[in-house]
Image: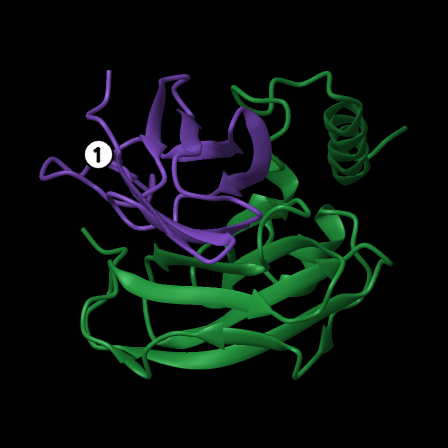
Chain colours: A green, B purple
């Protein structure tokens, strides 16, 4: 006799396995990492992308304003001088889903990307560099927002 | 079909700085309309940048990238006259490709 709770736990597990095997229609694109974008913390997001535990590093830089007047448009940049960067991630800690963007780099581009993100409230913003040798390095910066970008 | 992107690619030495301004709503799926109904998410999911036909950068985006997204990156070993193309696909399957010549 299974309790309802057990059943739920089991079906969640099965759904997870199916999703991992690609049987469920996760999104219109197979390559888009749904699990990473659903993550609520940096560690979860990095793990979903196959990285290890992130370590803070001075070699990674994040650029952005100290105070953003409009949370809907916050210019941020992620950069590192280290060679062998596989991926750069941008995360906003207090957004509903922390991961904002994943950039898969090749040898032909510099590990220096700038874009603009939305921020619901004042929060830490992280730049994460996933290296070819498996290391995961990050840098963070607090950006204060005077007007949120996620409200209606 | 979405509006065209604005792409500027400027050479400095053997590096080319590419700036792209896309035209897209980038709806998060968190907001509600005046009737209190959730506006469904609509955002660019995948972006590919090519230099003379070779892929140099791919990106996966979430809904927390700003409306009308801006992207800047630097291509190494490129020169004036080269072609830089950007292609994106959003979560509704809509897509757009635009090309610019490095100046």
**Location of residue B43 by image quarter:** top left
**Location of residue A56 by image quarter:** bottom right
Residue A124: x and y in percent read 47, 76
Nearest the viewer among B6 and B12 is B12
Q: Is mark 1 on a helix, strand or loop?
A: loop
Q: Looking at the image, which residue is at 63% across and 37% down? A: A33
Q: Is residue A39 visible?
A: yes
Nearest the viewer among B56 and B21 is B56
Residue B65: x and y in percent read 37, 49
Q: In this view, does A2 lie to the left or right of A138?
A: right
Q: Looking at the image, which residue is at 54% across and 78% down? A: A140
Q: Mark 1 points at which residue?
A: B37
Estimate how packed mark 1 is, as few (under 14), some (14 to 19) or many (20 or more) residues with alpha carbons within 10 Å.
few
Nearest the viewer among A144 and B101 is B101
Q: Quadrant of the N terminus of chain A?
A: top right
Residue A95: x and y in percent read 43, 60
């Amino acid at each position: 006799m299974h309790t309802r709770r057990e059943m739920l736990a089991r079906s969640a597990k099965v759904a997870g396995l199916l999703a991992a095997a690609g049987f469920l229609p996760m999104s219109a694109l197979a390559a888009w990492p749904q699990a990473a974008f659903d993550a609520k913390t940096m560690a979860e997001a990095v793990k979903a992308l196959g990285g290890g535990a992130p370590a803070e590093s001075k070699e990674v830089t994040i650029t952005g304003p100290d105070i953003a007047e409009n949370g809907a448009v916050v210019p941020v940049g992620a950069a590192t001088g280290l060679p062998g960067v596989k991926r750069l991630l941008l995360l906003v800690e207090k957004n509903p889903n922390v991961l904002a963007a994943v950039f898969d780099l090749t040898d032909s581009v510099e590990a220096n990307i700038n874009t603009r993100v939305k921020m619901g409230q004042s929060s830490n913003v992280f730049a994460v560099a996933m290296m070819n040798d498996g290391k995961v390095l990050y840098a963070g910066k607090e950006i204060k927002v005077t007007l949120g970008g996620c409200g209606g | 079909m979405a509006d065209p992107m604005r792409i500027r690619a400027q050479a400095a030495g053997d590096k080319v700085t590419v700036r792209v301004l896309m035209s897209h709503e980038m709806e998060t799926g968190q907001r509600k309309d005046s009737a209190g109904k959730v506006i469904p998410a609509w955002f660019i999911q995948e972006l590919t940048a090519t230099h003379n036909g070779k892929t140099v950068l791919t990106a996966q985006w979430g809904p927390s990238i700003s409306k009308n997204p801006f992207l800047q990156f630097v291509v190494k070993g490129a020169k004036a006259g080269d072609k830089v193309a950007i292609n994106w696909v959003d979560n509704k399957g809509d897509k757009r490709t635009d090309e610019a010549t490095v100046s």
